[in-house]
Amino acid sequence: MKIISWNVNGIRAAIKKGAFDWLISQNADIFCLQETKAHPEQLPPEVVTPHGYVSYFDHSKGRKGYSGVAIYVKSSLKVDKVEYGFGVPELDQEGRQIALLFKGDSSKKGPKWAFINTYFPNGGGGPERLAYKLRYYDAFLAYIEKLRKNGYSIVFTGDVNTAHTEIDLARPKENVENTGFLPIERAWIDKVIDAKFIDTFRALHPKEIGAYTYWDMKTFARERNVGWRIDYFFVSDDLMASVKKSEILSDILGSDHCPIFLNVAL
């Protein structure tokens, strides 16, 4: 199964830049977006429901042109259930998460599995916003652990908005006191890994340096590759043996983030 994830920094901007056409051309089984900044009714019909796909959207319930996620799934994949957010109004109001639950292929003894696309909050803007991000982090980990206790294998992806270790950003020393690389944020990723969820890219590319998924556009950081790896595919440990590839598609333009790719046998 081929999956692409991309923070597009506005789906309407991505359409104008040809980025959405590129996504369709990849023929992925699932592709998902973060930071869509739009409600479905603001989009052309061919973007809401491309040929051969079923789509699911979540969006900010208050602030327009902000946050938002989407998942596109090939029509041949049968989704058993869709869940939006955590059921916690404070954390769900910004439209940051969609989970698709699959029963699995019983004829092939395939796993019951969940695919989750999340746009984690940025911790910038003061102590209150950082506290919100950390509450969201804790709720998310509790959510995926509950799914696993209910028998689901897990694939989750999205813009986590934190670089895990020094190898995951170009200038770690300069950013150790900045959100996105604070010890308390990085410690949450440690908790995820301790809970036996695996960062697929780092598992397959343990020593690769200069591998980033986000660059500051204002400072032309992409041209200099002064970036951050803050977009991830994680899987529960029972699925890691089924992961064939986990790649960063850094040559694809259209956003301040680049797409990431996962190939997993499900």
Image (cartoon, rainbow, N blue to C red):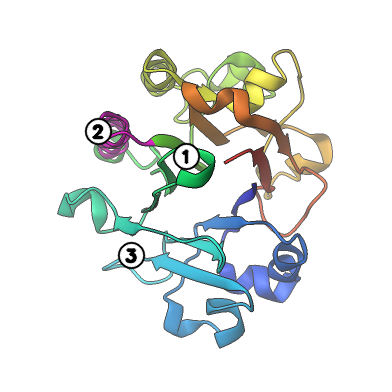
Which comes sooner in the sequence, label 1 or label 2?
2
- Is residue 207 or residue 215 the one in the foreground? 207
Q: Where 110 sits versus 203, above or below?
A: below
Report crowding for label 3: few under 14, some 14 to 19, many 20 or more residues within 10 A (C-alpha): many
For the C terminus, give its image quadrant.
Answer: top right
Q: Where does the image place residue 43, in percent across and percent down from the top left?
A: 52, 82
- Is residue 14 or residue 226 the one in the foreground? 14
Q: Left or right: 95 with respect to 153?
A: left
Give the magenta range: 132-152
- Is residue 222 or residue 120 the one in the foreground? 120
Q: Identify the residue shown where x is 50% and y is 64%.
A: 36
Q: Where does the image place residue 86, in percent across and percent down from the top left?
A: 23, 48
Label 2 with label 3: CB-CB less than 8 Å? no
Q: Where 186 sits versus 148, above or below?
A: above
Q: Where 47 sits versus 71, above or below?
A: below
Q: Which mark is residue 78?
A: none
Report crowding for label 2: few under 14, some 14 to 19, many 20 or more residues within 10 A (C-alpha): few
The residue beneath circle 2 is: 146
Alpha carbon of mark 1 to alpha carbon of mark 2: how far?
A: 14 Å
Q: Nearer the viewer, mark 2 or mark 3?
A: 2
Report crowding for label 1: few under 14, some 14 to 19, many 20 or more residues within 10 A (C-alpha): some
The residue beneath circle 3 is: 60
**Amino acid type of disc 3?**
Ser
Q: Identify the residue shown where x is 36% and y is 36%.
A: 152
Q: Which image quadrant for residue 236?
A: top left
Q: Secondary structure at mark 1?
A: strand
Give the total number of marks visible in the rendering.
3
The residue beneath circle 1 is: 156
- Is residue 9 or residue 112 the one in the foreground? 112
**Amino acid type of disc 2?**
Lys
Q: Secondary structure at mark 3?
A: loop
Q: Nearer the viewer, mark 1 or mark 2?
A: 2
